[in-house]
Each structure stands twice: as structure tokens, then as C-alpha cells.
Amino acid sequence: MNLFRLSPRARASARLAALVATCIAVAGLAIAQTPTPAPAPISAQPALSDDLPVPPAPEIVGNAWLLMDHATGQILAGHNVDARVEPASITKVLTSYVIAAEMQAGKVSADDQVMMTENAWRKGGARTDGSYSGFPVNQTATLLEMEKGMVVQSGNDAAIALAEHVAGSEDAFAALMNAYAKRIGMKHSNFVNSHGLSEPDHYSTARDLALLGSAMARDFPEEYSYNAIKEFTVGPITQRNRNLLLWRDDSVDGIKTGHHSGAGYCLLASAKRGDQRLVSVVMGSTSEAQRATDSLALLNWGFRFFETHALYDAGTTVSTQRVWKGKANEVNLGVAEPLLVTMPRGKYAQLQPSMDVPTQLVAPIEQGQQVGTVRVTLDGEVIAERPLVALEAVEQAGFFKRLWHEFLMWWNSD
């Protein structure tokens, strides 16, 4: 077409038509180059394992029980996991957690001199279903020694003395316990004392106690390690740890027994084999031997038939997506925390990852901002789901680029 033979108005119309045609072509190119959400790449497949069906969990004697993977928090098997139970001396795990947290905050020290008050001595040692550490009344011991007496010997007197030292009174310490329990995620628990002797409003659940044991191992590994001490001596008295699994299986490194007439025999146990840690809870069993036998059976079953894998590391790119109206045209997406999944052994190759990302990502985007979701399914069931976050910030582009992208986005809209 010879534009010089046309009128000025016609030439302007022709130029506009040519511009629109160019925009259409560029828009098509831009859209064609836009990445579409695709299954996120899973890390390299581990060595093949036997793809056997998982047999039922062992039969457990007790009112409530469960087995949980420490890394993922996934419950592998359980019964009455959210039923209210009396935690008995497993309560002392939370007492240890509170003390460790307060030490970390600089409020108390392992070298503090803790007084065995007459109140602690009488309340902790006089109950027939209680446990006595042996620290002399009206004398002091270091906080570290007193805590080991509570953990290893399950000393109720030591638990009360520690509560008084840390918070000033048992009631104030119980308030701390409930605050930390809430932070851990123990949604169905309430604590009114530091030792676990029966009280109407002192209760927990198997799920909450598993979360507590896992949190203790994760957040305060040094204090957690006290639970593996097999015996402890105070003055002339040497007492053995009541967790029989410490003598039966070297992979068991904790965590706490419990018993009184209302709770029955209870055991919160944990073991680590290779890179995998499992946590078991058995509540309301019939004897010290039965709770140990059942707990070990659960742990052995879990280690034999389940495995845990890290699919995506924190901060690594899972997907790269197109960004509109930004100084950068792409953004890398990943997970803020490692994405781990627990599954039956031999099922790794059957995992199905997928992403849910908006069709159009528009700047500005902040680093760490959630822009989508990554899901992992097995046999049609979602077994893991995590936010997809921007691994870097994308600032807003200048006026003309934003205007141009606005046109391209409009052209491609339905």
C-alpha cells in the first residue's frame, strides 16, 4: 500500500492498523513464551525398595496410642489420638521444655541454686503414687542436677522445686506450661502442675504428647538427651530410668514414662535409625513391661514399612514463572522450609507433584511472598502441601513497560 496516495486521515488509520497488528504478533510471542505451571521436579529418586503392602500396625494394649514421624509430623498409625487422657509423669517433658526455653531466654541458668522447699518435699514425696528424687529438704542443688533428678528419677519433688524456682509458684509455672504448650501446637491439653499427679483439669492427648516429644528433640536436643541417662544418683540413692527401652534398643534415646492409678502405665518414646526419627505414644497400658513391648513393636513397624524423603530444599528453585509489569520478567519460586514426605517404602516413584500458581503474576512481588502452592499426592491422596514463595523480590517496572504489559495482558484475557 502506498501511504502517500491516501488522505492524512487514511494514512493515520493505516499506521494504527499496522501498530495493532504488530501488538498482536508481539502479544502472541509473549504469551507463547510464558511458562505454564508444570509438575515441580522431585529430587533424584532413591534406590529402589521392595514395594510391599503395609501390614496393619501391631495390636496395642492401651486407651490411646499413636506412631508419628518426627520430621513431617505425619501420624502413621493410631487409636483415640485426640481422646483426653491423663499424662501422668510425661508432664515432666513439658516442665523440661519450659525450663530449657527460659534458660535460652536468659531468665534462669543451669548453675542456679534451686531450693528443695518443704512444700516441694512434702507434695512430691508423700503421695503413694509419686516418685521421689532424694534431694534433702531445705537444701539447694544446681538447676542442672535438680532437672536430671526430675527427668531420670521422675522426681515429683524436683519438678515442684524447679517450678517454684523458675516462676515463683506452681500456679505461675502452670501458666507458663500452657503458654508453651500452645506454641508447640498442643491444642487439646491443659496443665495445672509440673509433675503429673492426678488433677481434674490436668489432661492431654496422645497426639499432643507426640508433638511435645518431637518439639523437645527438635528445639532443645541437649536437654532432650537427659532422657537417655539410665541412672542417676542423689546422695546415697541411685535410681534407674523407668524407660525399659533404653536397655532393649540402642536406637531409643528417650523420652519419658508415666504412671499413676488414674492414668495407667504410659510411655512417650522416640528412636532414631539413620536419618529417620519416629515418636510413639502408648497411654493407659496395663504394666511397665506391656507399655515397653508395645512401644517397641510400634517403632519397629514404623521403621520397617515407612520412609521419609526431602523432596525440595528450602530456598531452591521449584519453578520459574513469568512476571508482568516488573523490572524482571521472571521470578523463581520455591519453598521456605524443606518439603519432606513420609510414605510406605517402595512408593517413592508413585509420588505425583503439582503446582497451583495464578495465571498472571504481577509485580511488585516481595521476597518470601506466597504466590502459589505445591502439592504432593500418593494414590490420589494429598500427603504434603506447602506454600510456593518468591525466592527474590521483583520491583515494579517503569510507566511505559507497565502500560505495554497492561495491553498485552488485556489482549490475552478471555
Image (cartoon, grey):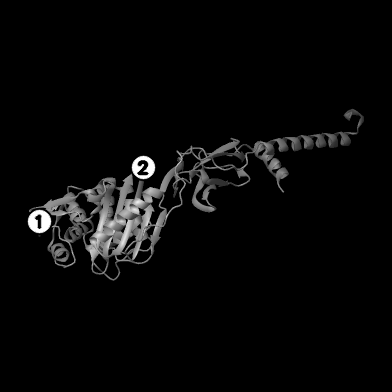
Residue at figure coordinates x 91%, y 32% from the top left: 6
> Residue 124, how many percent across, how many down?
17, 63
The quarter of the displayed image where residue 292 is located: bottom left
Residue 307: % across, % down? 41, 46
- Alpha carbon separation for disc pair 1 and 2: 44 Å
Q: Tag 1: residue type?
A: Gln
| Between discs 1 and 2, the one toward the N terminus | 1
* Residue 84 appears in the picture as rendered: yes
Residue 322 drawn at (x, y percent): 61, 39
- Seen from the viewer's position, the closer of residues 56 and 174 is 56
Q: Quadrant of residue 136?
A: bottom left
From the viewer's side, name the closer residue of 260 and 235. Answer: 260
Front residue (pair 277, 211): 277
Q: Label 2, on which residue?
A: 275
**With 132 as the anchor, is 70 left or right in this view?**
right
Q: Which residue is mark 1?
A: 139
User: Which quadrant does the N terminus fall into?
Assistant: top right
Which residue is depicted at the point 18% across and 64% down?
130
Q: Relative to 219, does residue 174 appear above or below in the rendering?
A: below
Residue type beneath disc 2: Asp
Give the number of the mark in front: 1 or 2: 2
